[in-house]
Image: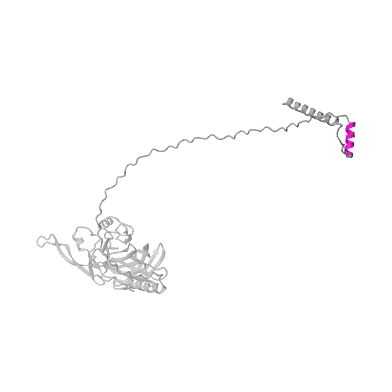
Amino acid sequence: MQHFNLSLLATACAFALTACSSSGGSSSAPSQPKISKPSVIQTQQNKEEKPKTATPTVKEEPKAVPPVVKEEPKAVPPVVKEEPKVVPPVVKEEPKVVPPVVKEEPKAVPPVVKEEPKVEQPAKNIETEAEKIARIAQNQEEVKKGFLDNGTFEKKIQYYGTEAITGLPLLQEGSDSFLNVTGKLLTVENQKFTHSDVPKSNRELNQLIINGKTIDLFSAEEIKAHRRTSPTDYVINDLSDKGVQAGKVGSLPKSKLADDFAQMRYGYVTDGNKTTLFVQGHLTPENGTANTPYSHYFYATNTPQATKGEVLEGLPASGSYKYIGSAFYGKDNAYQQLKAEATADFTQKTVSVALKEGDVEKLSLQGEIKGNTFSGLYQGVETKGAFYGTKAQDMGGIFYQTTGEEKQGVFGATKQ
């Protein structure tokens, strides 16, 4: 490539020299043009100067073009061949078994009963003070009721007589009149009281009848078992296993030969949203004597004496007697057991009762004795009760606290 360039340069010089020679040797030009001063000077300079050898034209080396750097192709990530997804095998569903269509019998369409228009009940409002006063007054009237003598009934008895010829004992039969169970039931619902008398159909001291439902207060088996023991305190029986929601009853004599709590039962029964306070038994005769069909000693024994019961003597004419027992006190179907200490003064015809929690007196009751019952209002507490058993051996009553925290209860006590 370099040799070729030098040849071109030599050729170019030769052409230049030839051109110069031709210009200088010619003398036959017709007229010399007027040469400007600068041109004469230039010509003179040319004559004086030694003819210069024409400088060969040096061809510029072409600028070095940086080599084209061939970009390395970007690394293309290899195409990862996706593994073909495993397609689960198509499970052929078993054809569903279509149950046979059961033809329904046409339902009997009940006759259209025309509804009676509903009577709109007034909204239950908070009790006003006037309504509360009226309710308490009505409750007091309900407490004052009850303990009316239910009279007597006739029943067969067995007894031993004497055979006329031999003089040996001879079992005989007869009949006699006996006291019915008498007392008071007070049903409490939403702090509204309803009095009920003990039904005359109830001739069993150890059964309570409420709205036709009979509840065993003490079963024959429980009384037999109790007679075989000598308890140091008066038993209180739990009634929650007697077919009711809750309840308690007292009491039984400490000894099988004793008269304490022999002819009276007292307590409460809660069923649903109602609580019934009760006292029932065989009233002490106001005068004379009376037969009671219940004998604790012979009860539930197959003996002639069991059919005869016992004889009750009348009220004391005078004297003051101490009684002890228990009480159930509360409201809203929740009742607390307290100790009851009472005094009956048959000379002054008064009754006083202190209800205690331990040694602390919670409530005091007082009343006036009238016949074989007593009643009174003392410090806002209304009380109604009666005497039971021989010579007023037992006493029991229902009370209502009308002032302060409104509560009610029942108590029973026996002579010491």
Q: Is residue 39 magenta?
A: yes
Residue 358 at x, y percent in the picture: 40, 62
Say if residue 413 shows up in the picture: no
Residue placed most toward the observer, 259 or 38? 38
Q: Main secondary structure of the magenta part?
A: helix
- Residue 166 rendering spot, x and y as whole percentages: 10, 60
User: Residue at the location (14% across, 63% down)?
Assistant: 173
**For residue 21, which quarter of the picture?**
top right
61 left or right of 116 in image: right
Question: Quick check: 366 above or below 22?
Answer: below
Which of the 4 image quarters holds residue 25? top right
Placement of 376 over or under 250, stated as above or below: below
Tell me the quadrant of the picture where the C terminus can be found.
bottom left
Of all residues, the one furthest to the top in this rendering is 3
Q: Nearer the viewer, residue 231 or 376?
A: 376
Query: Which region is colored magenta?
Result: 37-47
Residue 382 in magenta? no
- Judging depth in this view, the residue of 295 and 12 nearest the camera is 12
Q: State the image quarter where residue 367 is shown.
A: bottom left
The image quadrant where one finds the N terminus is top right
Provide residue 335's location: percent of width, then percent of height: 37, 63
Residue 15 in sight in this render: yes
**Total marks in image:** 0
Whether residue 68 is situated above or below residue 356 in the rendered picture? above
The x and y percentages for residue 54 are 82, 29
> Which is nearer the eye, 38 or 101?
38
Q: How is the image coloured?
A: one colour
